[in-house]
Image: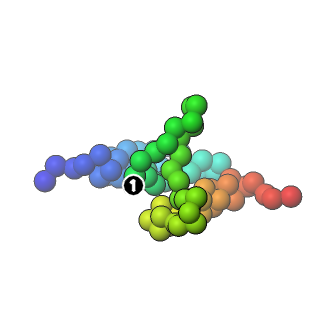
């Protein structure tokens, strides 16, 4: 069975990057992360998805994805030595 892009990266690219030291501080390697599952709104040069609508409803799928993304982002900042002062 042929490998998809993520599998190819996992099997061939990531081990090569680790071998040459790309996972040593201050660098880190993570897999691609997709956090969009719907329409993206564009304002100027920025894109966003609405998690909380004006009618106080919440897109639970987007809320979960956003929380996962933020946790990953904050963990990366912590691993890189950034601190809240």
From the top left corner, tell me how far across and down residue 70 is, in percent: 59, 59
The residue tagged 1 is 37
Q: How is the rendered protein coloured?
A: rainbow
From the top left corner, tell me how far across and down residue 53 is, in percent: 55, 59
Q: Nearer the viewer, residue 29 or 33?
A: 33
Q: Residue at x 48, y 64 (%)?
A: 59
The number of numbered discs placed on residues in the rendered structure image is 1
Residue 66 seen in the current view = no
Residue sitting farthest toward the top: 44
Q: Residue at x 13, y 53 (%)?
A: 1
Residue sitting farthest toward the right: 85
Q: Nearer the viewer, residue 11 or 5?
A: 5
**46 horizontally vs 5: left or right:** right
Residue sitting farthest toward the front: 55
From the top left corner, tell me how far across and down residue 80 is, in percent: 68, 53
Q: Secondary structure at mark 1?
A: loop
Q: Residue at x 63, y 61 (%)?
A: 75
**66 horizontally vs 84: left or right:** left
Residue 54 seen in the current view = yes
In this rendering, is residue 49 above or below 71?
A: above
Q: Residues within 10 Å of mark 1 (few under 14, many from 20)?
A: few
Q: Residue at x 44, y 65 (%)?
A: 61
- Where is the C terminus found, in terms of image quarters? bottom right
In this rendering, is residue 62 above or below 44?
A: below
Q: Nearer the viewer, residue 22 or 55?
A: 55
């Amino acid at each position: 069975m042929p490998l998809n892009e993520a599998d190819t990266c996992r099997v061939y690219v990531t081990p090569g990057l680790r071998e040459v030291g790309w996972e040593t501080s201050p660098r880190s390697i993570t897999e691609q992360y997709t956090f969009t599952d719907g329409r993206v709104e564009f304002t100027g040069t920025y894109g966003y998805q609405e998690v909380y609508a004006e009618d106080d409803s919440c897109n639970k799928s987007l809320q979960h994805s956003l929380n996962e993304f933020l946790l990953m982002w904050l963990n990366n900042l912590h691993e890189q030595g950034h601190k809240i002062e």
